[in-house]
Amino acid sequence: MKKKIMIGILTGTMVVSTILSGCGTSGSISETQPAAATATEDVAEETTTQQVEKDESQKEESASEAETSPAEQEMSLVGLAGSGDLFTVNEHDYQIEKKTLPLYLGSSDKEDTSEIEVAFMDGITDVPYISVETMKDIISKLLRAYYEESGGKKYDLEIEKDNDTVLLTRESKYPAKIDFADNTIHFYDFDAFIRISEEAPLMDVISATGFNENGESHLFQKSDTSFERYGNPVTFSPGEYGIDLVHQDDEYYVPLQLISDLILSAYRANVLYNKEAVCVAIVGGVDYFDDKYYISDAPAERSDDLIAFNYKELCFALDALYGLKKQHNISDFNTLFQMTGLIEPLMSKNPEEEAQALADLLCKYLDDGHSGNIHKSYMMKEDPKRNWGPSCSHKYDETDRYADARKQYYPDGAKPYEEIGNTAYITFDSFVFNQLDYYTEKLEDNLDDTVALTIYAYQQITRENSPIENVVVDLSNNGGGDADAAAFLIGTFLGDGSISMTNPTSGALVTENFKVDVNLDRKFDEKDSLRDYHLFCMASPVSFSCGNLVPCVFKNSNRVTLIGQQSAGGACVIHRLTTADGILFQISGLKQLAYTKNGSFYDIDQGAAPDYVIPDPELLYNRDYMTKYINGLLGK
């Protein structure tokens, strides 16, 4: 079996599209960049197209190849389980059957029940399609029902049809074009198209608007120095995976699972289909409609049609949306599945075997700390085992080690705020943002909330006749959490906070600079920080995700001294997906947290190295020792 590389020139840019048996495995996304901009887009991960130069040896290989446009070169590739045409679109006139099913939109505190019309191609009831009109309705209903506070109620989508193309235009005028002849979906700007509203950032580093419902200043003030750099056009190519977009009888149909992966998942909503109903899980849970999703007469085996589509869609979704492909040296997931031997169980009739293979991919092979399985499918009786890879295993071992070390000094749990001599210790084991009315709530009753604890600690540290000279934030047991909460702590320590984010697929960049109202006077000035104190941060191999972001930002600021060991990394925001057969899982998504230095963006996946290493975790929790140690560093 051969893998063909198609080389063509598009608007001054040479594009490589990898094709397996006539269909691409690494060609999920095509990016068109202006030639003058290519040298500056190093942060953009080139996932499915690459800029290449033909050297002289390539030109001389074959005169016929040199004369062909696009030229073709052959590379060896392991066969796809004997199914060489799996990724080939079999275009033909379909027998289309329409059916109306119950539609459940659910969240932890709300469930809406309505109906959805689906279409089945050639009697294959395992793979529902929906019309573009239904697609518009479900996206609009979702955003209007669950994202009103973020501007989702303003969401609108205009549909224009022209032969084999459908143009979708947001109320913000950003378009997406679905080409049913080429089986592609082209976004002029993917990030701008999927954001909730124009009022929201291009990528929501900080979701808080900075104003309360009365229009008063509230917690955050974003600086005029914040900026967004929009990304390149992106073309997703499901046809290269054998996924057909159907235009027939003046109707336009797309697979429901494709819309779930590419559009709905951006809003933390995921489709689960069980042949009887369509359930849309909001923010990763299915418990609120267990009785509707986990049906009693579920099939014991997956059909051949479901196996084929599920595999193709999984390859497409992971190629399109996994944010660490470059760092993990993954050209495409079909190749990875072959290299790891996962392809055979992923195409098993047994849903338990397939689920275990997917869990092994997420937990063992990706091993990034964010990727993992969440809920079993409606066909499964048991959840798969989580066979963690070395990185996750090490992090969990360290979690136990640091927790055990702290119990020696704090058997009932660490104190959220504590003063030892001239040093204040603030402990956050996670970042929690409950969006309380911090201006009126009794803060000491809400110290499990990061913003409440930060404000409370600030009040204690800055009180009249306070002995505090040194402030230590303890993140040594912090596994992550809410980015807004982490940002509030950053702003409190530094005065001028800054967090950046990139999308490796589109190349979009966002930097949000901000101040916080930590003294609750609804002003944002020099009083709203602790930067005049001696500032320290305790980090460890447990400090992950946002628990890693904060030490990285502190390290880059040169205003906060890091103590402990290198933080655990975790650059990407969690992105939840489903499989076509109903498994809910999560990956490291396309939003990469970063910090900037000299105008360059650096992702935080490597973690932050301490300024002073404390090899024994027990010492971190011996506050008397640490206070003497810190004063010693300061020459006291």
Image: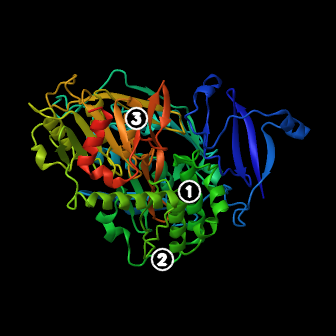
Check disc 3 and report its element: helix, strand or loop.
helix
> Which residue is label 2 attached to?
299
Q: Is residue 337 above or below residue 466?
A: below
Residue 313 marker = 1
The residue located at (32%, 71%) in the rendering is: 291
> Label 3 neighbourhood size at 10 Å, few (<14), some (14-19), many (20+)?
some
| Disc assigned to residue 175 | none
Q: Residues within 10 Å of mark 2 (few under 14, many from 20)?
A: some
Tell me if I can see residue 420 in this picture: yes
- Percent x, y of residue 516: 24, 30
Q: Which one is earlier in the sequence, the residue at label 2 or at label 3?
A: 2
The amino acid type of the residue labelled 1 equals Glu
- Residue 365 in the image: state x and y as whole percent: 56, 59
Of the two numbered discs 2 and 3 in the rendering, the one whose residue sits closer to the viewer: 3
**In front of the other: 505 or 220:** 220
> Based on the displayed image, in which of its 4 quarters is residue 499 positioned?
top left
Q: Secondary structure at mark 1?
A: helix
Q: In this image, 386 relative to 92: left or right?
A: left
Left or right placement of residue 511 versus residue 634 in this view: right
Residue for point 90% across, 40% down: 62
Give the camera-side residue of 327 and 547: 547
Residue occupying the point 17% across, 48% down:
447
Regarding residue 248, the answer to whether it shows in the image is: no
Residue 423 occupies quadrant: top left
Q: Where's residue 255, x and y in %?
A: 52, 55
- The structure residue drawn at horizontal position 58% and vertical position 67%, both measured from the top left corner, is 346
In this picture, residue 231 sits left or right of residue 136: right
Label 2 secondary element? loop
Q: Earlier in the sequence, mark 1 or mark 3?
A: 1
Marks 1 and 3, how far apart at CA:
41 Å
Task: Estimate the x, y position of residue 504 in percent, counting from the top left.
Answer: 53, 39
**In the rendered image, which residue does mark 3 sit on?**
555
